[in-house]
Image (cartoon, helix red, strand yellow):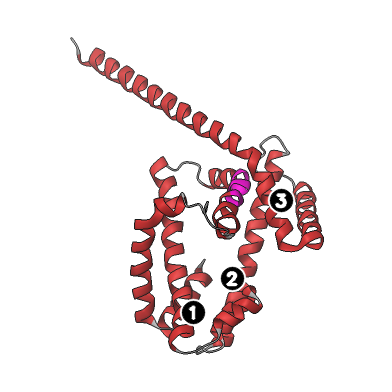
Amino acid sequence: MGLAVSLTAAVFILGPTVAIIDTFTNTLGSYLSELVRMSLRATPFRDSKWVGGWTIFYWAWWISWSPFVGLFIARVSRGRTIREFIFGTMMAPSLAAFVWFSVFGGSALYMEIWQGVPIADAVKADVSTALFAMFDVMPFGAVMSFAATLVVLVFFVTSGDSAVLVLGMMSTGGNPNPPGRIKLVWGTLVAGIAISLLLAGGLKAVQTATIVFALPFTLVIVLMVVSLWRAIRHDRKEEDRRERELRRRMRQMTEP
């Protein structure tokens, strides 16, 4: 995280700083005003693959990740309040995403529109290397390219390690620290499935599999929401009961 913050700060300072600030303000306002409309957007009267390839896909993507992410966050959030949990898992990451996309996306758009840097062509050629095309025209570009490669590597490894940890917990009866051999087996299986899907149909196969796997889990999420609501109500009742009992004992101690 420290390296990611440092890389963001470097692009913000060395890049088009004023344009980045303008981008952040403009896009944040657009996001807040268009959130509901864009979340429910569909294209019933024209042939467009945008909604299916982006909105619906990423809904399904996070639904398929929810068992891993939910258990992992619950494990590292033990002892936190609900308010702290919501801020740490929803507000803070959203704000970080706003800043990240404004800095890197705003810089790329500025260079493409005002400086004639062919970043759009780099995206069409290979979207995974377009970031480095932007670094090539910036000061200390080689250093930032190395830092970006390291950040991507660490983030991918962290995501995979978290998934393997949760799978190990699930397969060992909820053990918060599953044995290394269990995690190694799950890591091998996850990597093998990913490689098989990529070899079979490329990224499209991975996207299709993600949506297929996520569909049945939507019902589980609905049941989890109901269970969470019931658990919160139960805890509230227990807290009220303990408070009444404490008050009763205090009255008994103070009464003559």
Amino acid at circle 1: Ala
Q: Residue at x 58, y 83 (%)?
A: 133
Amino acid at circle 3: Ala
Residue 199 lies within the magenta run = no
The crowd level at tag 1 (other Cα within 10 Å; few <14, some 14-19, many 20+) is many
Q: Quadrant of residue 38?
A: bottom left
Q: Residue pushed farthest left?
A: 256
Query: Which comes before the other along the chain, label 3 or label 2?
Result: 2
Q: Residue at x 62, y 74 (%)?
A: 127
Location of the C terminus by quadrant is top left
**Main secondary structure found in the magenta portion:** helix
Q: Secondary structure at mark 2?
A: helix
The residue stretch that appears in magenta: 60-68
Of marks 2 and 1, the one in the foreground: 1
Query: Which comes before the other along the chain, label 2 or label 1?
Result: 1
Q: Is residue 146 visible?
A: no
Q: Which residue is mark 3?
A: 209
Q: Residue at x 60, y 49 (%)?
A: 60
The crowd level at tag 3 (other Cα within 10 Å; few <14, some 14-19, many 20+) is some
- Asked if residue 240 is positioned above or below residue 145 in the image, the reply reads above
Amino acid at circle 2: Val
Q: Which residue is mark 2?
A: 151
Label 2 with label 1: CB-CB less than 8 Å? no
Q: Is residue 233 visible?
A: yes
Of marks 3 and 2, the one in the foreground: 3
Distance (Cα) linking label 2 and label 1: 19 Å
Residue 37 at what x, y percent from top left? Answer: 41, 52
Label 1 with label 3: CB-CB less than 8 Å? no
Q: Which residue is mark 1?
A: 108
Q: Is residue 12 left or right of residue 141?
A: left
